[in-house]
């Protein structure tokens, strides 16, 4: 009979360097970790025919089965393999990552692949698959795996695979030359070389069955559970197992008894064959035929399980799908009889099988066919911590201790009370709080008081800091948890956190026996505010109804309320000083809660003190206020509110400024206190100005300040102020900013059109001419309804062509000459007198009128404009779009027109009128004309 010698395939680099424990020696452990690493093989190993597994077999485990993988690695380690038998895990439901496993006492990382192609691309040495896929998906996964050319064997663990799918898998496997073990199998084992999944059981059973080294007996069975029993029987009565396979109990297994027994027949190291059949099927008869025709010559110890079926009057279905006799030929009794007649070693009962096997083994030993080898000492495998703890072999201190709830049993327990009793007795949220917070049942009035506090503290409007934080965070698009936490983080000594402080101070004063007056005086001497006393809105004459509700409930239901009475007495003292120094809701709840702890009978004095120190009172406020904060979050989400931005006019900007180049204060950083900043209120003629400026107070004492003095005294401000100035310029639609001179007495100067403008604190302007500093009324700037209109030069403020009027003839006493432009009535009076030097007018119809040297322009709110030589003529001109009429105004000799939302740019070389229309998006102003 032909025999084939088994050879061990070399490693990828042609060498086999190993340490004493079987791990790779070179670079096995990195310097910076405890991870065992292995060099992957670079080519497919080619074992000899009939050798299904050997000590170089590499496999993939299909499915996330960490316990099975760890069992295979432990078996590899105890067998002194150089490399783990598991090359990686294929898990299609997750991305590519690594799984940490143990190699002996060291840790190693196994790659986890989502794609079959990727896995085999990375590991060309893998030829075996252990498929843990479910019965629903095992068909598709197995068919995909069989498309990989290097796959030689697949073990299918799942039970309940549809018979049609199982037959299709068998046909495809036969066509591709792939060995299928299963379905419905635990797998198989090659002692000292390779094991499939959970075959052989736990490590102590593997060691006891001597599966860490090969023996001389090869067995095949249907039942995976019985294969463990065979391992035990063979190890006790022979030199051990050579190889064992459980083909699976389904009706259509991938391989049969004869397939594996023929392999054993061809392997010279396998001396004895063991066949464990069962009732149902005819696979045993194929083995009988092989023995009869001489194909199998090695001794076979066999037994068919299920002889008890003859005791039943009807056919019996045993555990496996195929364990049912459809004819007399398929019964276990007939099978055993036929095998005995064919020359098999068949015991009379299964209990006699070990003795018969030992007899056959000893016979072969005496003949010299089997030469027992010395028993090697297997490496020690540490016991898994979880298993050792379950066996009670070790104990470990717990990292956490919980005394309030337990979810391990059939029913959730709150402080020992089943959750069903919580609802059956209707203890409410207050009762649940008493169980979880205090680990005991409190009286009904105590539970009611807790619920009352939660209701009273649930919300206090959107204006408080916690609610405002939650609202702002919600409007920023954050989620519920973030918004809730943003509000909760504001709770402290200033907001919501007065309960603990009030309880501490009132309790200390009460226990020391201080009178209310002594308590108040003591706190005043220590410069401390009394926590729980005072309210921003409520007072003695306008009491807080929440406090009244708490007082009423406590007085009616509590057995004692001495601390509340003491707090009320303190309130009498404080309100005698100021009406709003009342006992607020925080103080009232705090003292009442202390009365509850001390007098309800459920706490000792030490326990009551401990709970107060733990901060349980603030816990009440946090729990209650969370209700309101969540409500504000939902409210803002429901309203679809946009991102919140606080308005500028509600912020006072007090930024430091870097003084630079000033008279008497060179290079000095100065806080904006010695000088006052004002809105940009004018345009410097013929030159762009984009900064604020100051002059020291010494300039104010100069009777006739000149332009040179102003320039010398000007000190530039930091860049941040320039940015702020530009923002204000854009808001007022001004092309430039006026250098403002701040004097200590509150007057401001700005260079303008060849002179200066002085503005006092009320922003009333007067003109100062450089020549004689005569005070003249300056119609230079006025803000009416948010609109601004200006004239360019001081000489344009009066018209020499008008009868009797000449700049030289004007004086402060002239009836057409006024010093203020602060009321609409003044505008109307000037309009009636038709004074041509009035530069702007706001009519009741929201039209704006500007008078120039040669014409008058009227603009309505639609920015249509009319031009004429006087006011009436201007009103009669047909109105059209603003652009055309501004050109008409320029042609008529107008110097400049500045309606709202228009920008002017003046330079010494050219004069342009730029306009930004009030409708549509912002865009670059259009040049309307030159003059």
Image (spheres, rainbow, N blue to C red):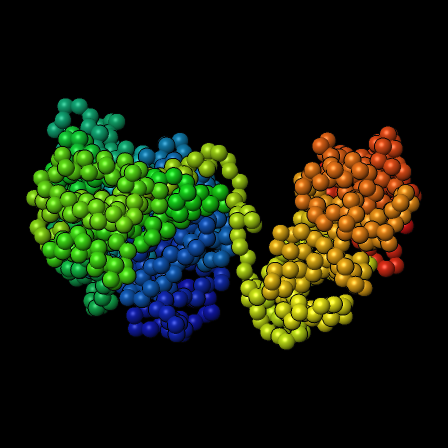
Left or right: residue 198 versus residue 802 is left
Nearer-the-camera pick, 843 or 272: 843
Nearer-the-camera pick, 20 or 723: 723
Q: Is residue 318 above or below residue 705?
A: above
Q: Quadrant of residue 69?
A: bottom left
Residue at 22%, 44% (x, y): give it.
588
Residue at 37%, 32% (x, y): give it.
162
The image position of residue 767, as x and y in percent, is: 75, 56
The image position of residue 574, as x and y in percent, is: 24, 49
The image position of residue 18, as x and y in percent, is: 36, 72
Left or right: residue 648 versus residue 459 is right
Q: Is residue 574 above or below residue 429?
A: below
> In this rendering, does residue 297 appear at all?
no
Quadrant where the N terminus is found in the figure:
bottom left
Nearer-the-camera pick, 554 or 174: 554
View extreme (front): residue:
813
Q: Quadrant of residue 542?
A: top left
Residue at 42%, 64% (x, y): give it.
9
Nearer-the-camera pick, 900 or 752: 752
Q: Is residue 358 above or below residue 279?
A: below
Q: Quadrant of residue 752?
A: bottom right
> In this rendering, does residue 56 appear at all?
yes
Left or right: residue 833 versus residue 271 is right
Left or right: residue 151 versus residue 628 is right
The image position of residue 157, as x and y in percent, is: 33, 43
């Amino acid at each position: 009979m032909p025999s084939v010698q088994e050879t061990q395939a070399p490693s990828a680099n042609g060498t086999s360097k190993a340490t004493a424990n079987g791990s790779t020696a070179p670079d096995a452990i990195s310097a910076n970790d405890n991870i065992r690493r292995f060099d992957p093989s670079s080519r497919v190993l080619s074992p000899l025919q009939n050798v299904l597994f050997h000590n170089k077999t590499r496999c993939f485990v299909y499915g996330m089965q960490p316990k099975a993988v760890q069992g295979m690695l432990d078996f590899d380690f105890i067998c002194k393999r150089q490399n783990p038998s598991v090359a990686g895990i294929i898990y299609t439901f997750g991305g590519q990552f690594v799984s940490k496993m143990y190699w002996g006492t060291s840790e190693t990382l196994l790659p986890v692949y989502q794609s079959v192609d990727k896995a085999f691309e990375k590991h060309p040495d893998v030829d075996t698959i252990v498929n843990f896929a479910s019965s629903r998906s095992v068909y598709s996964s197995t068919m995909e795996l069989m498309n990989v050319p290097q796959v030689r064997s697949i073990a299918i663990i799942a039970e309940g695979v549809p018979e049609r799918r199982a037959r299709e898998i068998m046909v495809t496997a036969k066509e591709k030359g792939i060995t299928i073990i299963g379905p419905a199998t635990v797998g198989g084992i090659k002692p000292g070389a390779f094991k499939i999944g959970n075959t052989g059981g736990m490590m102590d059973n593997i060691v006891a069955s001597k599966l860490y080294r090969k023996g001389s007996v090869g067995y095949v069975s249907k039942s995976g559970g019985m294969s463990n029993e065979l391992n035990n029987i063979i190890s006790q009565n022979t030199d051990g197992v050579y190889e064992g396979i459980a083909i699976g109990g389904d009706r259509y297994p991938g391989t049969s008894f004869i397939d594996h027994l023929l392999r054993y027949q061809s392997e010279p190291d396998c001396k004895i064959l063991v066949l464990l059949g069962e009732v149902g099927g005819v696979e045993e008869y194929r083995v009988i035929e092989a023995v009869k025709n001489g194909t199998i010559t090695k001794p076979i110890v066999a037994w068919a399980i299920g002889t008890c079926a003859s005791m039943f009057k009807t056919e019996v279905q045993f555990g496996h799908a195929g364990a049912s006799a459809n004819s007399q030929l398929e019964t276990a009794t007939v099978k055993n009889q036929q095998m005995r007649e064919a020359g098999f070693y068949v015991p009379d009962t299964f209990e006699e099988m070990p003795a018969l096997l030992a007899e056959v083994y000893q016979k072969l030993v005496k003949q010299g066919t089997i030469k027992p080898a010395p028993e090697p000492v297997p490496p020690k495998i540490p016991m898994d911590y979880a298993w050792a703890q379950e066996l009670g072999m070790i104990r470990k201190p717990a990292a956490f201790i919980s005394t309030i709830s337990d979810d391990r049993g059939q029913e959730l327990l709150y402080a020992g009370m089943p959750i069903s009793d919580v609802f059956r007795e209707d203890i409410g949220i207050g009762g649940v709080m008493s169980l979880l917070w205090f680990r005991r049942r409190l009286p009904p009035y105590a539970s009611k008081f807790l619920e009352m506090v939660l209701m009273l503290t649930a919300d206090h409007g959107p204006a408080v800091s916690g609610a405002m934080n939650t609202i702002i965070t919600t409007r920023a698009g954050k989620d519920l948890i973030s918004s809730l936490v943003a509000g909760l983080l504001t709770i402290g000594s200033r907001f919501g956190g007065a309960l603990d402080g009030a309880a501490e101070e009132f309790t200390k004063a009460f226990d020391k026996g201080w009178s209310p007056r002594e308590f108040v005086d003591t706190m005043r001497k220590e410069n401390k505010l009394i926590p729980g006393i005072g309210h921003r809105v409520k007072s003695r004459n306008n009491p807080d109804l929440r406090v009244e509700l708490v007082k009423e409930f406590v007085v009616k239901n509590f057995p004692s309320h001495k601390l509340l009475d003491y707090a009320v007495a303190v309130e009498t003292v404080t309100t005698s000083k100021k009406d709003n120094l009342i006992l607020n809701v925080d103080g009232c709840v705090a003292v009442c809660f202390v009365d509850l702890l001390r007098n309800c009978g459920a706490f000792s004095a030490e326990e009551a003190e401990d709970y107060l120190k733990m901060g349980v009172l603030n816990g009440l406020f946090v729990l209650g206020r969370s209700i309101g904060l969540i409500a504000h979050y939902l409210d803002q989400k429901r309203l679809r509110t946009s991102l919140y931005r606080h308005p500028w006019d509600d912020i006072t900007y007090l930024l430091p400024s870097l003084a630079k180049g000033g008279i008497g204060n060179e290079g000095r950083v100065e806080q904006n206190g010695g000088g006052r900043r004002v809105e940009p209120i004018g345009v410097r003629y013929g030159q762009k100005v984009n900064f604020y400026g100051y002059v020291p107070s010494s300039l104010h004492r100069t009777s006739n300040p000149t332009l040179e003095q102003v320039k010398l005294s000007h000190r530039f401000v930091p860049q941040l102020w320039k940015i702020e100035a530009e923002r204000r310029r854009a808001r007022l639609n001004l092309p430039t900013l006026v250098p403002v001179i701040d004097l200590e007495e509150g007057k401001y100067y700005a260079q303008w059109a060849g002179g200066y403008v002085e503005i006092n604190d009320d922003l009333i302007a007067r003109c100062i001419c450089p020549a004689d500093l005569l005070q003249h009324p300056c119609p230079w700037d006025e803000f009416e309804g948010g609109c601004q209109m200006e004239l360019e030069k001081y000489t344009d403020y009066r018209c020499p062509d008008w009868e009797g009027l000449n700049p030289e003839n004007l004086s402060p006493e002239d009836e057409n000459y006024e010093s203020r432009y602060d009321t609409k009535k003044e505008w109307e009076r000037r309009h009636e007198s038709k004074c041509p030097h009035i530069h702007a007018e706001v009519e009741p119809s929201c039209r704006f009128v500007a008078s120039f040297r040669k014409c008058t322009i009227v603009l309505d709110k639609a920015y249509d404009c009319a031009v004429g030589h006087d006011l009436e003529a201007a009103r009669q001109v047909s109105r059209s779009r603003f652009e055309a009429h501004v050109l008409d105004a320029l042609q008529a000799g107008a110097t400049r027109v500045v309606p709202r939302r228009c920008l002017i740019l003046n330079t010494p070389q050219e004069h342009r009128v730029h306009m930004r229309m009030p409708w549509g998006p912002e865009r670059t102003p259009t040049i309307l004309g030159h003059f």
